[in-house]
Image: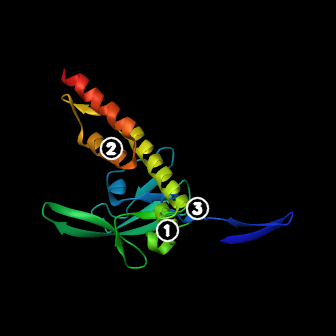
Amino acid sequence: MVNYSQKDGYSAIVLYMNTDLFIENSFSLTPNDILLDRHHGSLKINYWTNDSADLSSVCVSIEGREPQKINLDWEEITYGERAYFQCECGLRVNKIYLPENGKEFACRKCHGLLYQLTTFNRHTNAGKFLYKQNRLQKLMESREKMGRILYKNNFTKRFERFLNLCNKAGLDDVVKGANTLKELIAQ
């Protein structure tokens, strides 16, 4: 949404971005979250079925809200079965979302959710800056969640991928520090 304002003879363009439409700001569920009864921090989520033998639908209630029936679609794979969500629109998806002010879980297309990176032009100077800041934030969050970085005196695959992404993002100091650590361990 664009708003034109005029103050003291100067006109300015103010851009307002609705962050409710970002996937990153929405709560998401996967079928494994329900089937393995994973907990989401301090959020109280209740799952139940009417028939424990039939897992074609599950009822979900978050923090005392009205329960929602969610249909599961099962697909035969090489070694067993895999569950997907069947959204109200007919799409079979692996994640369903609940935006901050949303009332029901649905796929990202039903909620009109976008990835934050798709909302700006990466070819402009401002867009390049926003892109780099977004990547740095994501890298910091991924490193924060990462457990061990070494296994049998070698970097884990996850940490190697992290270093590769840091290298692409231009974080040379992080990569040099990690390589120095690896050399010290090898001695």
- Residue 38 visible? The answer is no
The residue tagged 2 is: 162
The residue that appears at 87% across and 63% down in the rendered structure is 8
The residue carrying pointer 3 sits among few (fewer than 14), some (14 to 19) or many (20 or more) residues within 10 Å by Cα, namely some
* Amino acid type for the residue under numbered disc 2: Phe
Q: Is residue 35 above or below residue 174?
A: below
Q: Is residue 160 above or below residue 91?
A: above
Image coords of residue 139 (percent x, y): 41, 45
Quadrant housing the C terminus: top left
Query: Which one is earlier in the sequence, the residue at label 2 or at label 1?
Result: 1
Q: Is residue 42 above or below residue 106?
A: above
The residue that appears at 49% across and 58% down in the rendered structure is 128
Farthest residue, direction right: 8
Residue 182 or 60: which is nearer the viewer? 182
Local secondary structure at mark 1: loop
The residue tagged 3 is: 19
Query: Which one is earlier in the sequence, the residue at label 3 or at label 2?
Result: 3
Distance from label 2 to label 1 (Cα)?
A: 27 Å
* Amino acid type for the residue under numbered disc 1: Leu
Quadrant housing the N terminus: bottom right
Local secondary structure at mark 2: helix
Farthest residue, direction top: 187
Could you tell whether 65 is left or right of 150 in the image?
right
The residue carrying pointer 1 sits among few (fewer than 14), some (14 to 19) or many (20 or more) residues within 10 Å by Cα, namely some
Distance from label 3 to label 2 (Cα)?
A: 27 Å
The residue carrying pointer 2 sits among few (fewer than 14), some (14 to 19) or many (20 or more) residues within 10 Å by Cα, namely many
- Residue 134 visible? The answer is yes
Residue 67 or 85: which is nearer the viewer? 85
Q: Nearer the viewer, mark 3 or mark 2?
A: 2
Residue 83 or 182: which is nearer the viewer? 182
Residue 86 or 179: which is nearer the viewer? 179
The residue tagged 1 is: 113
